Amino acid sequence: MYQASPAHGFSRRDFLRMTGGAAGVALLAACTPAGAPTGGGGASQEPVTIRYAGLESMGARVEEFLGPWIEEQGYTWERGSFGQQELTDKIMQSVATNTYLADVFQFPSNARADVIAAKALMPVPEEVQDEIDWDDILPSIIRTLSWEGTPYALPYDGDVHYYAFRKDLLADAEISGRFKETYGYDLDPDNGANTWQEWRQIGEFFTGWDWNGNGEEDDFGLACMTKRGDTAWWGFHSRATAYAKHPDDHGYFIDTETGEARINNPGFVRALTEWVEENQKWAPPGGANYTYGDSANAVIGGRAVQTYSWDAVTQSSDPEMSIIKGLQGYNILPGSTEVYNAKTGEWESFEEP
């Protein structure tokens, strides 16, 4: 809830599986700023207007869900629609300048610390909390919604990033044989790429020859969401975590003891260097500026072999949208057997990713 003035030991792959849940969470927060043009109800007062700010696509679903209740209460509704990064920028500007944005807004979990720690939100009312079955929500998401044990938002989305690949191509004996001749190991049609090194080799191998059989030069090894001002933040950090997040270190973006930023350390630099190369060499034309939808469409349209992002199962299974129905495999994100330890300043090796 926004206020107009200030108030108050497991494996790497286990770690990635656990942290993925929080990464895709989008949060709702209600707000009633002092002096905002809303009424308090009653015949002698102006009608209550609820102002909502959210993503263009998801905001429409909120309006659809709340519409009957709003009409029943005699309220009016105004919805502001924004792009992915635009919404975050609007929220951060509102927090930084202590200005009113909306009564209710949706925001992604990567803005959580700035928004909640700035005391820009009011806690979720007790009567609302009483209506929620908290046992149905993953503990990691509850922690994301909360600050010092107090919930300040409700869960909107609980997506995770996962890895999707063409299991039919990886299971093809002739293709697998040629791949093994080049890289020295068999393709894994059950799991796809288990490490980012395997992801890169699969991307390289499937680029530049007609594996989709359409006679056109539109065959590529991978597709990622890379567009700045859109979903590049999410795409990059899913790519970087395996290198830059050591399992024995609570910090990731910053050192939790010193506050020092880590974005330029060797783990992040290696991830970014590889990511840039991959999308320049083995992604479709324009792949260095792909949205989430672009990357998903490249795979379900039969132009790329693998991707990682949010859920696209529905699209890939719909014959009106996809040409790969039943041909796609899924797994958690690839990992790495080498992880940078920011505390020691050294790379460490693990037997399993």
Image: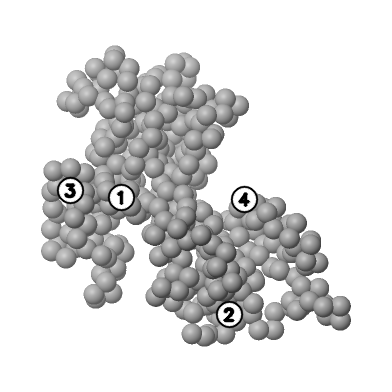
At a point 43% along the width and 44% down the height, the residue shown is 309
Q: Secondary structure at mark 1?
A: helix
**Mark 1 or 3 closer to N-term?**
1
Residue 151 point in image, percent of width and height:
48, 70
Give the foreground label among 3 and 2. Answer: 2
Work out how far the residue at label 4 is from the one at label 3, CA to CA, in angstroms.
Answer: 38 Å
Q: Nearer the viewer, residue 219 or 123?
A: 123
Residue type, mark 2 in image: Gln
Q: Which residue is mark 1?
A: 16
Residue that label 3 marks: 338
Which mark is nearer the camera, 1 or 3? 1
| Residue of label 4 | 57
Instruction: Identify the image quadrant of the C terminus.
Output: top left
> Which secondary structure lies at badge 2?
loop
- Where in the figure is residue 137, as x and y percent of width and height? 46, 57
Q: Tell me the distance, in whole angstroms, between the alpha carbons under discs 1 and 3.
A: 14 Å
The residue where tag 2 is placed is 3
